Amino acid sequence: MLARLLALLAMLTVSVTQILLSAAAFSAEPASPKATQRSSAAASVKSKEAEQALVDRALSLNQQAAEQYNKGQFQQACELETQALSLFPDQAVLWENKANFLLAMGKSADALACFDKSIALEPGASAFASKACALANLGRFSESITASTEAIKLDPQHWKGWNNRAEAYYQQGDLKKAKADVDKTIEINPQAATALAMRGSLKMRSKDLDGAQADLDRSLQIDPTVGLIWCSRATVSWRKKDKESALKYVQKAALLAPNNPVVKQNKTFMETHSVDDPAGVTTFNGIVLDPEQKASQLKSGTKPGAESK
């Protein structure tokens, strides 16, 4: 499903500048009354120096974790953030950071527990939006919608809240609500590549192939590294009966996501079928385009996108 497969790109983009803490993020003990004896003053200075050393250590660990994350070293990032948490376990942002690292590692249940700890300490829009991602990964779409809605309430300009709620609505088959939220996402952040890809998928489902192509091309101009979106672009070309372009795009998808089952399915199908036989070609998140098949999935209790697991 898209929420699982594209979590790194749409729902938990983290940069060093976003993740670094300032010393002010750590709550210090109130200054003690002016000491009346030199021994007390000396002890106070030593105490403050020790406290500042802990803050500096936590900041250093957090910076190293961010750098490892941005290199794709998620396990190392998580271990460093855990060390920072051992120094300041009451800091919500550290729990949120660790949760994002776990989410990147595909450990959504563990990430969810960390997001809950962060929110319990300090409810924030980004934590709720990322919690929505973890819930969607676990197939808990109604709860994902609730978490995204909380993010939107806290910060109506937090585009990931709108984006993640759109994804959950999409997975539930509520395309009208998904479109409204994805349009809002793009209004807030016109550079949201995965939101553009989702809107392209929605347009493809409504048979607006030119509109779908425009959104997908724009998405790929912003971020050309997502194999699943290239796969969706291939599907548009296939629907337009341009097999040569479809094969070019699906081969690009296979280079970027060689083990993705949706990419494999589309590549095999396109290489062995005529463009006059569209059955079996899927969108970038694994939901079959045929509306009757989608309805059959829902009636049988199969979760949309289940074939991409």
Image (tube, grey):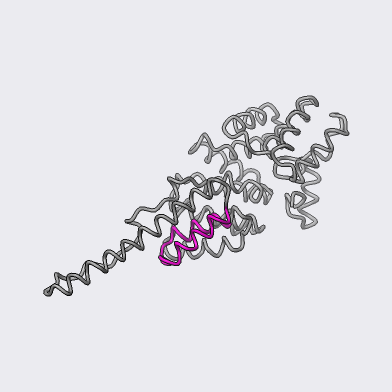
Quick check: 34 left or right of 211? Answer: left
**Magenta stretch, residue numbers:** 74-102
Q: Position of residue 187 (x, y in %)?
A: 50, 36
> How far across and down, in percent of the image, does residue 164 sit?
57, 49
Q: How many marks?
A: 0
- x, y (%) of residue 211? 65, 29
Q: Is residue 20 left or right of residue 110?
A: left
Of 64 and 19, nearer the camera is 64
**Which residue is found at the position 55% from the left and 65% from the top?**
113
Single out the residue that lies furthest toward the left.
36
Query: Residue visible at 50% across and 37% down?
Result: 189
Residue at position x 75%, y 49% in the image? 308
Of residue 44 and residue 278, the one placed in the foreground of this image is: 44
Residue 136 covered by magenta stretch:
no
Where residue 262 sits, quadrant-wise, is: top right
Is 197 situated above or below 53?
above
